[in-house]
Image (cartoon, rainbow, N blue to C red):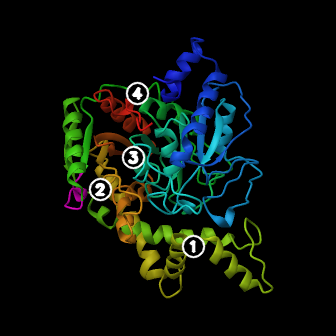
Amino acid sequence: MELYHLTIHEVLEKIRKKEVSKQEVLQTTVDRIKDIDYHIGAYLYVNKKFHMNDGELSGISMSIKDNICTKNISTTCASKILKNFIPPYDATVVDKLYENGCILVGKTNMDEFGMGSSTENSSFHITKNPWNLDYVPGGSSGGSAASIASSQAYFSLGSDTGGSIRQPSAFCGLVGLKPTYGLVSRYGLIAYASSLDQIGPITKDVEDCAIVLNHIAGYDRKDSTSFKYRKIDYTKELRKDIKGIKIGIIKEYMNESMDAYVKKSFFDACKKLESLGAIVEEVSIPHVKYSLPTYEIISSSECSSNLSRFDGIRYGVRRSKDLLNDLFTSTRSQGFGEEVKRKILLGTFFLTADSYEEYYERALKVRTLIKKDFDEAFKRFDAMICPTSPTLPFKIGQRKNIIDKYIQDTYTVAANLAGIPAISIPCGCRENLFVGLQIMGKAFDEKTILNISYAFEQIHDYHKKRPNWR
């Protein structure tokens, strides 16, 4: 297998044994990007200058979603309004990875400001799924997922507001983790919905996911939502034995809206988990059926508040006008894309005096009920499972209806509302179209969902597959 196709832990072993040099590892990624990214469009910016630090991950190349700040490197959120924005600082997660020797090879494409599930909403170009170029890679972290599936970096960092790490990971046959809210610093992440956003890794396998989490997790005084939690080496906690672990199938998700092959793959995965000794039973999360409208109200409202800072005065593009209101209107009309405008308008409506109690306040109450449902279920179960997406990847341009796009988040938004960790791992593949298995755990119990994922990974070879389109 080519060097760029290997996992982080495989490459680190080769470096340790002096079979390859760190420079060779970096060069293979740089050459790979030059050779194939014009087919895929994973990157918005490709780095040309590299500085290699010593550290546990020295020589490992990474890609970063373009809503995570990188000092002296453009960070646009795939939006025209931030086209010329160059941050004067690095996000905390980027700092931590630099300190451990990682090398940033580029910033990846995304749905503008994280609003979308296909990476078709970027203001610059559409990213394609490396497994089939006619299909979307998912979103909003579609560029990050595509860069890893096509071996144009060894891992990527994405952000997840309602499934934006897990869903593209599912569509691209990868492992994607949304950590517990507060475990990983959000300092330097350009906010979409602050109470939901979380940074997490996209990797080729579970062990790589644990390696990256080791280096990005931890308290950060610069992030007021960061939580002081004991340090864990997640790689040392990985176990193949999950005998006796209780796993709940969320009953409310088992309905007719699920694609037939997704359902088959999911229940096949349930049987495999049982064969490993896990106890798999159905569980009810009564209020989870309201999670999608609850998410849309809260995320749109917070988006309306967060994006009000982009006014043409302090950041990015400025459309010059004599009057202040004309400046705001012109800049935002030309700078924001259609989906972002839709979210801002909806959120502004939800926060008006006449609508606040009826929509936003009620959504917050339902969010509390959803969290209580999960807390109650976790008294009996160690983890919950469901598919990551109700459908297989769809063709570029196929989903014109806004509602059809929103339902991609049906199974993923609840974890963000409850603030719990959730991971997606591949559990099925038909004609190079992947199905993801989503595993949710108790707050700050990433260890358990990583263990379940690792045990499941040992009995199939999805994580060893690489696209063969070229």
**Residue assigned mark 3:** 132
**Residue assigned mark 2:** 390
Quadrant of the rendered image containing residue 220: top right
Which residue is the extreme one toward the front? Answer: 470
Work out how far the residue at label 2 is from the one at label 3, CA to CA, in angstroms.
Answer: 19 Å
Q: Which residue is at the front of the view, 192 or 63?
A: 63
For residue 380, which numbered disc appears in the image? none
**Residue 298 visible:** yes
Work out how far the residue at label 1 is from the one at label 3, CA to CA, in angstroms.
Answer: 35 Å
Residue at image point 37% right, 36% down: 448
Amino acid, disc 4: Leu
Amino acid, disc 2: Pro
Magenta-drawn segment: 250-257
Identify the secondary structure beneath mark 3.
Answer: loop
Tell me whether circle 2 and circle 3 mark residues in contact (CB < 8 Å).
no
**Residue assigned mark 4:** 238
Work out how far the residue at label 1 is from the one at label 2, CA to CA, in angstroms.
Answer: 28 Å
**Residue assigned mark 1:** 304
- Position of residue 79 in the picture relative to residue 9 (left or right): right
Work out how far the residue at label 4 is from the one at label 1, CA to CA, in angstroms.
Answer: 41 Å
Q: Earlier in the sequence, mark 2 or mark 3?
A: 3
Of the 4 image quadrants, the one containing the N terminus is: top left
